[in-house]
Every structure is written in structure tokens, then in C-alpha cells.
Image: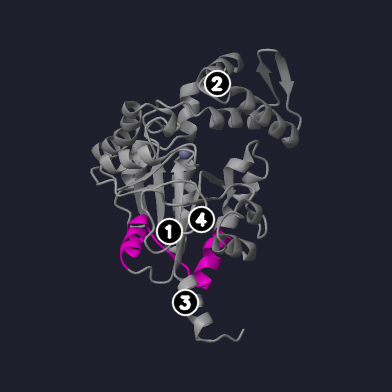
Amino acid sequence: MQGGPLIGWAQNRLGRRGCLFTFHRAAPSGVWADLPNRGFHLDLGFLDRLLGYLRRTGWAVVTLDEVLRRVEGDLGGRFVNFSVDDCYRDTVEEVVPLFRRHGVPVTLFVTTGIPDGTLPLWGAGLEEVLRIRDRVLLPDGPLPLPDAEARRAAYARIAALWDGPDAGRHYRDFCRLNGIDEEAMHWRHAISWDMLERLRDDPLVEIGGHTVSHPRIAALDPQAASAEIAGCRTRLEERLGRPIRHFAFPYGRAGDCGPRDFALTRQAGFSSAATTRKGLVRQAQDVWRLPRNTLNGNHRSLIAAEAHLSGASGAAARVLRRV
Ligand SMILES: [Zn+2]
């Protein structure tokens, strides 16, 4: 396309931008296909293709430390950061090895109740029971699970019933009814402190905080909100012996965290806070409300991310459309 100096200038300006992506779990394509809650898991094959595409097209994959340096100085071209929220065992077994193979960094936002074993991983536990059993017992009777479709429908139905402050109790009852060892199930899915300690010196792994118990921060009183935000930082620093500079809000949409919470994050000693509000990072970005674009199991091919990222101001959606 031909363009005058003004268009050249505009293209140059538009080229200087950052896109932050976030996701939760990831599974190899063959495993992904049969997962009862596959929307929560990113297809690793897709992530692999996306990382390859970004490299070929000149996007730098960077840490959040580097994002902050660029925001405070010169954005210096196009850059991407990937962060994994919550952190399960697959973060260590699948995600970090993939980023290592590509030689690019990944940020882990850890909810400390997971390695501490105090946060019930009811979604992960429910999903696994539904995946391995031919039927499960519910309070109103047995539920047959003849195929993957039935397992997905069962997950959606049960998760909708449990979701809320009583989810942990529902899950405990379900485990009892179905003879599941809840503790053993937790460690089949949780990231552990041993695993995190093995990652703490890895130059391609950046570790940040994501609260203690994964609450909706805006719904808490200031004291409780502060305990969640500062508490995860203290715990991570005490276990890992490294400064923890970045924080991500659970859920992270407009109603989940607001100006009071951004201020609490700064007071807790963090250097940045990330949301899940869609958009791109540009010069003079407010680092206490970094936008992030969520990737999930619906993003497996090239087109699928488009609808989800339609709120992003272009680049993220354009990238994903072409992968
Ligand atoms: Zn989270």
C-alpha cells in the first residue's frame, strides 16, 4: 500500500504497542479434545503455533519487568507478554517447557492457597472425576456418563450449581459420595512449592502474585482485600526468597477490581497490577490496571479467537485471526 509521510508516521506509531495475553490451564491437543471443561484449557498445539507465528512476524515475547521498562521509557516496537493465572501442575509440566522450547519468557501469577493446599480445586477435581468414571453419584441419584458429550454437559450443569461461596462444601460432599480422596486429588492438579522453587531461578519464568484464596477483590472490605493482596506477596517472597513485583486480580473485569484495589496493590509493594480488561498497552499506560486479553479453549484455530478479542483495539484480534 502506498502512503505519504503521515501514513508512514501513523504506521510507525501503531507498530509500537504491547499485547498481554492470559490463560489458565493448557493440555496437549489429544487430551484437550475429551476434557469435560475444555474451555478452561488452552490447546497446547495452538499455543505452540501462536508462539511460532509471533516470532516470525517480529513480536518480542517479554516479561512484565520488560513491559514496565518499555512503558516507562520507549515502547520499542511490538511486544507480547503471556501470563498464566492461578497455576496448576500443568503450568510446570506443559506450559513452561513449551515456552522454554521457544526460548521466550512466561509470567506465572500464583494463587498461594493452591501450593499451600488451602484452596479447594473443585473445578479440577470435578472435571477429573467426570473424565475417568462411567457414572457419578449426585445427591439426587446416579448420573451416567456414556461419552465425552455427556461428560461436558455434566460438568456444565454441576459447575453452575456449585459455583459461589459454597463450591468447596459441595465438592467435599461430592467426593465423599463418590469415594474420592480430596487431598490426593488436590495434589494431582495443584502446583507445589517444590515445583515453584525449581522455577524460581529460571530466567524464562517470572513469578507474580494472584491473591491467597482467589476472591473477587472488589467485594471485600479494605482489610480483607489488603490481606489477600499483600498476603500472597509475603508468602511467595518467604517461600521463594525473591522479590515479587507483579500482581494480577482474580477475574479482573471492571466489577472485580477498582481504584481502591489498584491503590491497595501499590501499597502492598507491587510494581504493577494486571486486569482482564481487553486492550493494548501503549505509551504512558497506567501500570496499576494493565489490560490483558484472555485466551481459552475456544482459541484453537486461527479464527476462533476473533469473537473473544473483538473488544481489543485491533492488534490482538488481527494476530489471532492469522495464526
Ligand atoms: Zn485466577
The answer to whether 306 is drawn above or below residue 261 in the figure is below
Residue labelled with disc 1? 100
From the viewer's side, name the closer residue of 18 and 313.
Answer: 313
- Label 3, label 2: how far apart the Cα atoms are: 53 Å
Q: Which residue lies under the disc numbered 3?
A: 12
**Which residue is at 46% across, 52% downward?**
291
Give yes or no for residue 61 being in the magenta stretch: yes
Q: Is mark 3 within 8 Å of ligand 1?
A: no
Q: Which amino acid does the dot numbered 1 rest on?
A: Arg
Residue position marked by numbered label 4 in the rendering: 279
Closer to the camera: disc 2 or disc 1?
2
First along the sequence among labels 3 and 1:
3
Answer with mark 4 or mark 3, whichever residue precedes in sequence: 3
Mark 4: which amino acid? Gly
Question: Do tag 2 and tag 1 residues touch (Cβ < 8 Å)?
Answer: no
| Magenta run includes residue 246 | no
Residue that numbered label 2 is attached to: 171
State which region is magenta. Answer: 48-73
User: Which residue is at a point 62% across and 84% down the rendered structure image?
Assistant: 1
**SS at mark 1?**
helix
Question: Helix or strand or loop: what does disc 2 sit on?
Answer: helix
Q: Which of the two marks, 3 or 1, is nearer to us in this view?
A: 3
Q: Earlier in the sequence, mark 3 or mark 2?
A: 3
Secondary structure under the numbered disc 4 in the rendered image = loop
Q: Earlier in the sequence, mark 2 or mark 1?
A: 1
Give me the C-alpha separation between circle 4 and circle 3.
19 Å
